Image: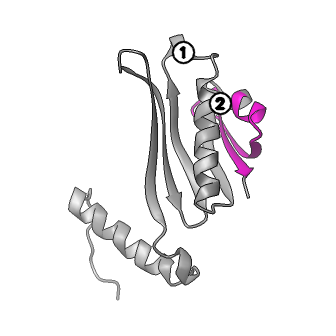
Amino acid sequence: MTANMDITLGSKEESEYVRRKLIEFNAKHVPEHLQSRYEEINLTVKDEDGTIVGGLLSVLCWNWIEVDILWLNESKRGLGYGTRLLDEIEHIGKEKQCTFIKLNTFSFQAPDFYVKNGYKEIAIIEEAPTGSRHYYFKKDIS
């Protein structure tokens, strides 16, 4: 007989509990020297007034870095700042002995930019969102 269980929206504390439990499980399946490797690495681009005009938000996990967000103010696009952000996160990844960087983007964002910067397409999801494509990229840096 199956117990009656409720599925509810989790609070912040409950979500953190679930995250910790998965991290505990995962730690049993990766080499010991990688088990505690997790850190946020966030970069910003500021103009001469100190105003943030762009940035890159990422997470180092085990032996890779995952770029979650790369954004530049429209007035700063095409000026090399995006490439400089990628160069810097790749440099940091190499220093921290990561072997690759992964990221995702949409067809209405910048897939060609990532290809130009040496990222290889590893997957595409069609119609995500409707009328667009969701791209996944990887770049080996070791």
Q: Residues within 10 Å of mark 2 (few under 14, many from 20)?
A: some
- Res. 106 image quadrant: top right
Q: Name the residue under label 1.
A: 76
Does the stretch in magenta take in 118?
yes
Q: Mark 2 points at which residue?
A: 83
Residue found 43% across the figure and 18% down from its top: 47
Q: Residue furthest bottom?
A: 1
**In the picture shown, does residue 45 fall above or below 11?**
above
Locate the C terminus and report the quarter of the image it occupies: bottom right
Does the stretch in magenta take in 56?
no
Does residue 132 appear in the picture of this structure? no
Segment tinted magenta in the rendering = 113-140
The kind of residue on which mark 2 rests is Thr
The kind of residue on which mark 1 rests is Lys
Residue 41 in the image: state x and y as whole percent: 46, 49
Give SS at disc 2.
Answer: helix
